[in-house]
Structures are given as C-alpha cells and as structure tokens.
C-alpha cells in the first residue's frame, strides 16, 4: 500500500499488481469482504485544504471509488453526505468513522437511487444535514456481466439505465434547488464509454450517455456559475467487480491489460474528483478526465 501520496514513485510499482482469486458476492458487494482489500486512501491520502468548507453529497459513497472520494474530500476540508444502499451499511459505517476521525462531518443517507422519491429526498436531506450543498458527485452505478445479448433481459437493461443515468438526471435536477454559483457536479463515467466490453453492453451504454449528459448539462449550467464535469475510470479494483460485474474466470487477470500492467486502486481516482471540485479547475467545464492506467481514449 502507498504510504505517502506526495512521494516520488514509479506508478507501475506504487500499488501492488494484484491477482484476485475467483470470488463472488451478492450485488451490490462489500469492501469489507473483498479479497484482496482495496486502498481507499484512509492511510495514505493527505489533504491540503483544497475543499475547505465545502458541503458534498456523494452517491455510492460507501465503498470503492465513492468511498475514496469521500475520504479525500474530508481530508481536503469538506463535510460529506454519503448515499448508499441499505445493504452496504457495514462499509458506510467504516467510511463515516474515517471521515469523522479526519475532523469532518459524515452524514449517512441510505436508500435506493432506483427510487425517484429517494433521488429527490437524499439531496434535500444532505443540504439540511450539512447546512447547504455546493458539491455533488454522482458516482453510484450498477454493473452486471452478461456474455450474450440474448441473455440480457429487459429487466436488467432497464435497471442499469435507471441507476446509472436516470438517477444522475434526477439527483442533479434536485440538487439545483441548492447549488449556487461556484458549485460543482462531477459524474462517474468509465473507459467503457469509449472501449466497451462485449459482456457489459448495458453498462457501457449508460457510461456513454453519462459523457454526453455531462457535456450538455455543463454548457447549460455554465452561465449560472455551476460547473459540470466527469471522471472516467479504467479497471479499478472494487466490490463492483466481484458482485457479477466481471466474469469470474477473468478476475485473476483484472486490469493487467493496461499499459501500467495492473488494476487501479480507488484512492488513485480521488485526486481527479478533488481537482474538478476545487476552484483550481474554474475554467474546466464539460470535461471527462480519464484515469485508466494509460489506455488511449478520446
């Protein structure tokens, strides 16, 4: 594991190359049960006050990328509301403790983003609990591997779109009741938007939609002083992969086809979200920042 994010290090070796054993978890999966464990930055991320006083809502904040972003935001001075499925309570409680130990407020808001009422309520509850809202990270996503399109049923297609893109529309729309000039929205897309895996047709399609939504909404909200951007992760080791997100036989080689030769860790994504939320990126709008271990992308 990394010990100091500021140390000059070879990126090939900064985090160990992993060979995950074949394993299975029920959707949505838990970091607490993942082998090997992920690095979400709890022992390595050092903040510099770049988000001091910000009040952020992060969806899918209990594990994986969302958890790493929540920790980084707290270390940078933000208070954080965590949206997550009730089944992920164990992971959410752990991230909440890390945030509070960092001296910031953690607000736990369990619920299902497939529920339109929750998409609206979670925003209002976050704003009420944090005393306002000026940063939104739409990170929650659903990914289920299906080898053949004939086996991809309408229910899964609809559910994937409901969580991955319709919820972003709903939550972003609700957030505009609270966001003022200087506020930011950052959406999680994926390398799958550009280089779709044959077994992830529905997931990859939603990620392409998120890219387009980000660029359109970014232009629409720019005159209001609200910036919208996205981060496109490559293969990142998270519970998403073992809860049917990847074929089980593919797990041992997960991420080894990148130019760096390894899967990424969630904490390696966090600085991208910090940058797009901080005032340092004030002239960046509608951008998709790729963090994928070197895989070429548009």
Image (cartoon, rainbow, N blue to C red):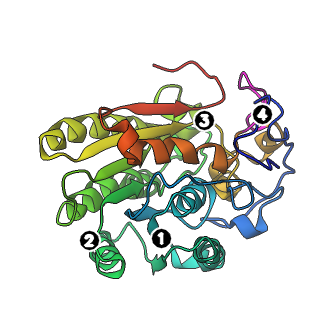
SS of the residue under disc 3: loop
SS of the residue under disc 2: helix
State the residue position of label 4: 262
Across and down, in percent, residue 276 comes to: 41, 42
Q: Crowding at label 3, few (<14), some or many (≥20) Cα neighbours within 10 Å?
A: many
Q: Is residue 91 above or below residue 67?
A: below
Question: Given contact means CB atoms under 8 Å apart, are the residues at marks 1 and 2 in contact?
Answer: no
Between the C-alphas of marks 1 and 2, the distance is 14 Å
SS of the residue under disc 1: strand
State the residue position of label 1: 82
**In percent of the image, x 22 and y 64: which residue is there?**
174
| First reached walking from the N terminus: tag 1 or tag 2 | 1
Mark 3 or mark 1: which is in front? 1
* Quadrant of the image occupied by residue 221: top left
Q: Which mark is residue 234?
A: 3
Based on the picture, tell me whether residue 9 belongs to the magenta stretch.
no
Between the C-alphas of marks 3 and 4, the distance is 11 Å
| First reached walking from the N terminus: tag 1 or tag 4 | 1
Between the C-alphas of marks 1 and 4, the distance is 29 Å
Q: Crowding at label 1, few (<14), some or many (≥20) Cα neighbours within 10 Å?
A: many
């Amino acid at each position: 594991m990394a010990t100091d994010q500021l140390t000059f290090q070879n990126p090939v070796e900064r985090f160990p190359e992993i060979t995950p054993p074949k394993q299975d978890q029920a959707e949505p999966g838990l970091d607490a049960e993942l082998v090997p464990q992920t690095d979400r930055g709890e022992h390595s991320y050092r903040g510099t006050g770049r988000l001091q006083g910000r009040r952020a809502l992060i969806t899918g904040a209990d594990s994986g990328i969302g958890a790493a972003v929540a920790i980084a935001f707290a270390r940078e001075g933000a208070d954080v509301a965590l949206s997550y499925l009730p089944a992920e309570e164990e992971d959410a409680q752990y991230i909440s403790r890390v945030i509070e130990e960092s001296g910031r407020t953690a607000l736990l808001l369990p619920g299902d983003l497939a529920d339109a009422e929750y998409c609206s309520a979670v925003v209002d509850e976050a704003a009420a609990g944090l005393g306002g809202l000026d940063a939104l990270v739409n990170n929650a996503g659903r990914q289920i591997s299906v080898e053949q399109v004939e086996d991809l049923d309408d229910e899964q297609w609809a559910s994937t779109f409901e969580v991955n893109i319709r919820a972003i529309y709903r939550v972003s729309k609700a957030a505009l009741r609270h966001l003022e000039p200087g506020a930011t929205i950052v959406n999680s897309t994926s390398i799958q938007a550009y280089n779709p895996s044959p077994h992830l047709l529905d997931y990859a399609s939603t990620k392409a939609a998120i890219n387009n939504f980000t660029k359109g909404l970014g232009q629409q909200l720019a005159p209001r002083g609200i910036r919208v951007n996205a981060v496109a992760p490559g293969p990142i080791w998270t519970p998403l992969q073992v809860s049917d997100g990847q074929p089980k036989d593919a797990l041992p080689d997960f991420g080894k086809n990148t130019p760096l030769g390894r899967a990424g860790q969630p904490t390696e994504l966090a600085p991208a979200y910090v940058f797009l939320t901080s005032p340092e990126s004030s002239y960046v709008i509608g951008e998709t920042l790729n963090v994928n271990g070197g895989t070429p992308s548009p």
